[in-house]
Amino acid sequence: MQDRVSCSTTEQRGVFAAMAIEAYCVKCKAKKIMTDPVEGTTKNGKPITKGKCPDCGTTICRIGAAKK
């Protein structure tokens, strides 16, 4: 089984916080810039970035590796 990558340290979160990662919010029906993005992997090993919608607070996801 593959280990999941987690951004639990403040240093790693700072890198993602500086990046403007955009994802679609289903509740707002619009693309929003993620707050508190965290990079990880899905069950099948694909990269994913999860964060919160700045307007409604719903969890939003962006599938694929974050561009660095």
Image (cartoon, rainbow, N blue to C red):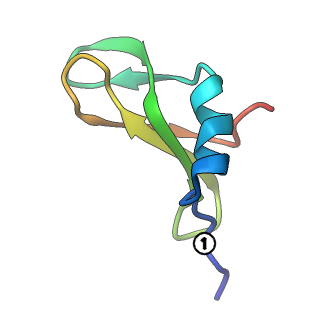
Amino acid under disc 1 = Arg
Residue most extreme to the front: 10
Front residue of 27 and 55: 55
Residue most extreme to the bottom: 1
**x, y (%) of residue 35?**
42, 28
The quarter of the image holding the C terminus is: top right
Q: Which residue is mark 1?
A: 4
- On screen, residue 53 versus residue 15, left or right, reads left
Residue at left 31%, top 20%?
Answer: 54
Above or below, comparing residue 58 to residue 45 in the picture: above
The quarter of the image holding the N terminus is: bottom right
Residue most extreme to the right: 68
Residue at left 24%, top 16%?
Answer: 55
Residue most extreme to the top: 30
Above or below, comparing residue 14 to residue 47 in the picture: above
**x, y (%) of residue 12?**
66, 49
Q: Where is residue 30, by image quadrant?
A: top left
**x, y (%) of residue 33?**
46, 17
How crowded pointer 1 is (Cα within 10 Å; few <14, some 14-19, many 20+) is rated as few
